[in-house]
Image: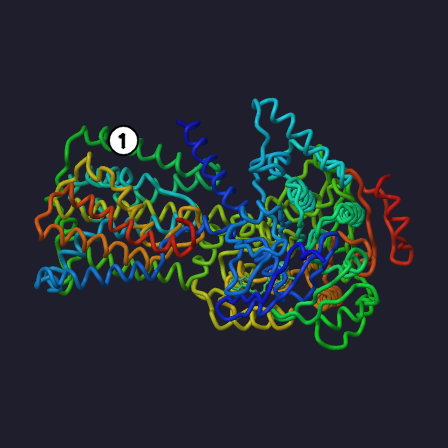
């Protein structure tokens, strides 16, 4: 029997105050999908980074085809045809989609010709995963979802033998997930080895042959996927019996209209969007890539301008020239893109949570430390954020824990209207349930909530009403009793 | 010019993203900064070496000499540090210093100390605020704005003064600023210490300080959190302008001579101190304490070289070498230099 494609032996990696990986052993055969699952902060991304040479382990060994290798640099990993799709997107905003995909591997040739060729090659790749995206667009202007697709194409473009995915579907829509999984199956049939990390367990169950469960930096189990059900998997992850979270949804009484838009529009982006969210109500906006729902919520938050229509808050017509205006009217916005929009990565956990309530924490301009720490600590506790302390830098937290801070800072603010964009992006099963419950609680406290998610099922679980958008217009409107995935999906393309 | 700068920015960011695409922690390059430990270590080494070379090195008199020599540069560096923390740069400080001093100097015939000093400081504040508005509200890159402002204010200083130096002799209070003392401590040193303490309080303990680092760390996320990022940047430029005017005034008072061609190249020395102090030019990091230590390092090195009678040119070489010696360990530690 030939040696496994990739072997990782007794890897140990510590950060000051945390053992991110302790004695982790893992192997990957050709033609298999090997999933790695675990709670937020379990060490998944660290393990993947070690495999890819981004992070040097304290001790341990990596073998490729049975040969020990020293991956002290991602270029070495690439030379061994090992590619990683990052959890945190690392793209060049000023370059085009095609240039990003082939960065560092540009075919030689005359400039103009090369560009056309790059675009064509990128188009082929995008077609493979059934995505309609213009390869000449600058990455800086893409949505999170589109960037994720570019990131995936970039890994595919280097014709790897080992492909490592760190939460590739965290910001993909349901239909895109289906396409990606199909591509992965095809790659697997071609004999690639694939490492797959995701918090969407149903996906993991569908696609993987084996699964390794990490908990607090150690391997709890490596099992064949066949014969394992979701409950058993979750039990391994959290280390105790996990009661299947029944839907957090609670019947609520809704009050007056808190937020209303009347036929708002922005030339070339969206038009004629009218919606109402009442106090205590959770309203979702569903839609596919390019439906512009992200732009609509940003307009409501004052981050983008509108040229038509009006926005009313608590019945009053308002002019929102900046997010500051919107915040003054009691609107909060939890963006999905934690790295670009949600967090100040070089600042501490405590500072990030305090960011929305600086005014309140000031006395004569000085920070009331004790009050800040009390507020931040209580949120760290409620949201179960895994951190060394309030002074740990946000950049050092795992992805899911960063996401929780984005939620936390707006809970700290406590405005009457909350816009939540993918609040559970990259969050583990247990915490996901907690966040959904928190959002239900907010509604119960009388807040009006506008919700965007990539998973339709999550939205149907949480919302009282759902609006559907397609190409910048509202194409459907459903009350909870009429929710049906087919009916809603039908409006996606209307 | 504009194109050249654009090109430069372009290559900087491609470099940045190339590093990022090899994806070391993508922030490694952005947070290229001088490590605290190596800076303090160098300072201590210099103190020990200084005492070994000249026995009078740590005498009160010599300490005053050292501090007096760095007072102006240090005060300017406080303002520069705030600007750099927000991710901007202020190259106009030497111009602001000279134009403010000339503007104040034109008030000398009135005989009013308040008018002379007030005009000087307000001019600095006002030019700084104009910088801030151009950068923050109109979105003109600070490199270009302040480079332009440097040229304009130098030219205006020459026009207003007719190219002639002004003499603040008649204004006793003015001279006192540069030459007087408070309980035996030279006044510029008192100001250096007091303003340093104020700047530390501002950056470390105030809510403005949090907004400052947030604006530099991630301006988009800061704005989405409700931080007034335009206001923050406008304010730091105004502070930098006022610091420049004050520093210029201290120097002019010390020399009792307002020179319309003075402070040549001062912005680069101040920038060197700021970077040596640990502020990263891409924003979000840096501290006043670091800047203070850096100013002391530069002051001590120059003082020692003076005492050893080293030529001014060799002094510049040594100063540059010291800066490298402090910067390199931090870079190795971050695995940037290979
Ligand atoms: N640069 C760092 N400095 C300090 N601690 C770190 C650093 N990077 C990661 N950690 C810590 O290592 C642990 C593992 O993090 P890792 O990112 O591997 O988690 P993960 O399993 O990928 O979680 P998630 O599902 O949230 O993405 C976490 O506790 C995290 O705080
Ligand atoms: Mg992770």
Residue A406 in sight from this viewpoint = no
- Looking at the image, residue B153 sits to the left or right of residue A274; the answer is left
Give percent across and percent down for residue B186: 15, 58
Q: Residue at x 79, y 50 (%)?
A: A174
- Of residues B36 and A61, the one drawn nearer to the viewer in this rendering: A61
Chain assignment, label 1:
B
- Looking at the image, residue A110 sits to the left or right of residue A36; the answer is left
- Of residues B253 and A492, the one drawn nearer to the viewer in this rendering: A492
- Of residues A494 and A77, the one drawn nearer to the viewer in this rendering: A77
Q: Is residue A223 above or below residue B180?
A: below
Q: Which residue is mark 1?
A: B156
Give percent across and percent down for residue B311: 11, 43
Q: Is residue A158 above or below residue B28?
A: above
Q: Residue at x 91, y 58 (%)?
A: A481
The quarter of the image that holds ligand 1 is: bottom right
Q: Is residue A84 above or below residue B183?
A: above
- Of residues B104 and B139, the one drawn nearer to the viewer in this rendering: B139
Classify mark 1: helix, strand or loop.
helix
Quadrant where the N terminus of chain B lies?
Answer: top left
Residue A340 in sight from this viewpoint = yes
What residue occupies the far bottom of the structure in this picture? A240
Give percent across and percent down for residue A261: 74, 46
Res A408 quadrant in image: bottom right
């Amino acid at each position: 029997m030939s040696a496994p494609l990739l072997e990782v032996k007794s890897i140990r990696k510590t950060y000051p105050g945390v053992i991110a990986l302790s004695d982790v052993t893992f192997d990957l055969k050709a033609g298999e999908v090997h999933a790695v699952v675990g709670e937020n902060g379990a060490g998944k991304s660290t393990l993947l980074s070690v495999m890819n040479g981004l992070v040097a382990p304290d001790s341990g060994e990596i073998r490729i085809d049975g040969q020990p290798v020293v991956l002290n640099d991602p270029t070495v990993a690439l030379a061994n045809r090992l590619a990683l799709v990052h959890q945190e997107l690392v793209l060049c905003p000023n370059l085009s989609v095609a240039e990003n995909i082939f960065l560092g591997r540009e075919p030689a040739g005359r400039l103009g010709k090369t560009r056309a060729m790059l675009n064509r090659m990128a188009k082929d790749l995008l077609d493979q995963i059934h995505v309609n995206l213009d390869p000449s667009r600058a990455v800086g202007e893409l949505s999170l979802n589109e960037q994720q697709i570019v990131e995936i194409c970039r890994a595919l473009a280097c014709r790897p033998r080992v492909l490592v995915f760190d939460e590739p579907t965290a910001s993909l829509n349901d239909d895109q997930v289906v396409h990606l999984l199909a591509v992965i199956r095809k790659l697997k049939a071609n004999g690639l080895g694939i490492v797959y990390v995701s918090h969407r367990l149903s996906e993991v169950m569908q696609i993987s042959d084996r699964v390794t469960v990490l908990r607090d930096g150690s391997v709890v189990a490596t099992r064949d996927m066949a014969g394992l059900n979701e409950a058993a998997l979750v039990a391994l992850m959290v280390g105790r019996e996990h009661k299947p979270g029944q839907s957090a949804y609670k019947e609520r009484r809704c009050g007056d209209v808190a937020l209303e838009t009347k036929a708002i529009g922005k030339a070339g982006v969206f038009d004629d969007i009218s919606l109402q969210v009442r106090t205590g109500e959770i309203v979702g906006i569903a839609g596919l890539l390019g439906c512009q729902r992200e732009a609509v919520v940003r307009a409501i938050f004052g981050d983008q301008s509108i040229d038509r229509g009006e926005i009313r808050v608590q019945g009053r017509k308002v002019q929102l020239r900046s997010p500051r205006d919107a915040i003054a009217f009691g609107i909060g916005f939890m963006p999905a893109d934690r790295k670009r929009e949600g967090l100040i990565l070089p600042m501490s956990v405590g500072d990030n949570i305090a960011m929305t309530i600086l005014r309140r924490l000031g006395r004569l301009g000085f920070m009331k430390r004790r009050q800040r720490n009390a507020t931040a600590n209580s949120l760290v506790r409620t949201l179960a954020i895994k951190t060394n302390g309030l002074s740990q830098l946000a950049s050092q937290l795992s992805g899911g824990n960063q996401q929780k801070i984005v939620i936390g800072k707006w809970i700290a603010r406590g405005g009457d209207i909350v816009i939540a964009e993918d609040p559970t992006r990259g969050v583990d099963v247990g915490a996901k349930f907690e966040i959904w419950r928190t959002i239900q609680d907010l509604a119960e406290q009388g807040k009006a909530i506008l919700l965007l998610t990539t998973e339709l099922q999550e939205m149907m679980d949480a919302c009282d009403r759902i609006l559907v958008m397609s190409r910048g217009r509202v194409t459907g409107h459903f009350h909870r009793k009429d929710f049906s995935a087919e009916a809603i999906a039908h409006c996606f393309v209307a | 010019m504009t194109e050249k700068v654009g090109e430069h920015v372009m290559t900087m960011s491609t470099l940045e993203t190339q590093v990022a695409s090899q994806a070391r922690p993508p922030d490694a390059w952005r947070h290229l900064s001088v490590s605290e430990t190596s800076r303090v270590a160098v300072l201590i080494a210099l103190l020990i070496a200084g005492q070994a070379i000249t026995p009078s090195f740590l005498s009160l008199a010599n300490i005053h000499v050292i501090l007096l020599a760095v007072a102006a540069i240090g005060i300017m560096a406080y303002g520069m540090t705030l600007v750099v923390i927000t991710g901007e740069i202020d190259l106009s400080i030497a111009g602001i210093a000279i134009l403010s001093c000339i503007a104040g100097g034109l008030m000398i015939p009135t005989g009013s100390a308040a008018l002379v000093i007030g005009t000087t400081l307000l001019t600095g504040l006002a030019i700084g605020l104009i910088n801030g508005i151009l950068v923050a509200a109109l979105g003109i890159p600070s490199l270009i704005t302040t480079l332009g402002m440097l040229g304009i204010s130098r030219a205006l200083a020459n026009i207003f003064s007719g190219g002639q130096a002004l003499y603040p002799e008649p204004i006793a209070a003015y001279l006192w600023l540069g030459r007087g003392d408070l309980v035996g401590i030279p006044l510029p040193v008192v100001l250096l210490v007091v303003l340093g303490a104020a700047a530390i309080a501002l950056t470390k303990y105030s809510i403005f300080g949090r907004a400052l680092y947030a604006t530099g760390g991630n301006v988009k996320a800061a704005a989405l959190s409700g931080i007034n990022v335009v206001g923050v940047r406008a304010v730091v430029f105004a502070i930098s302008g006022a610091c420049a005017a004050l520093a210029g005034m201290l120097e002019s008072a010390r020399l009792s001579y307002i020179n319309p061609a003075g402070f040549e190249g001062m912005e680069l020395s101040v920038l060197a101190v700021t970077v040596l102090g640990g502020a990263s030019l891409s924003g979000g990091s840096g501290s006043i304490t670091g800047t203070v230590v850096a100013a002391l390092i530069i002051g001590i090195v120059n003082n020692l070289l003076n005492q050893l009678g080293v030529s001014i040119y060799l002094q510049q070489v040594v100063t540059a070498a010291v800066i490298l010696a402090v910067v390199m360990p931090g870079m190795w530690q971050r695995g940037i230099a290979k």
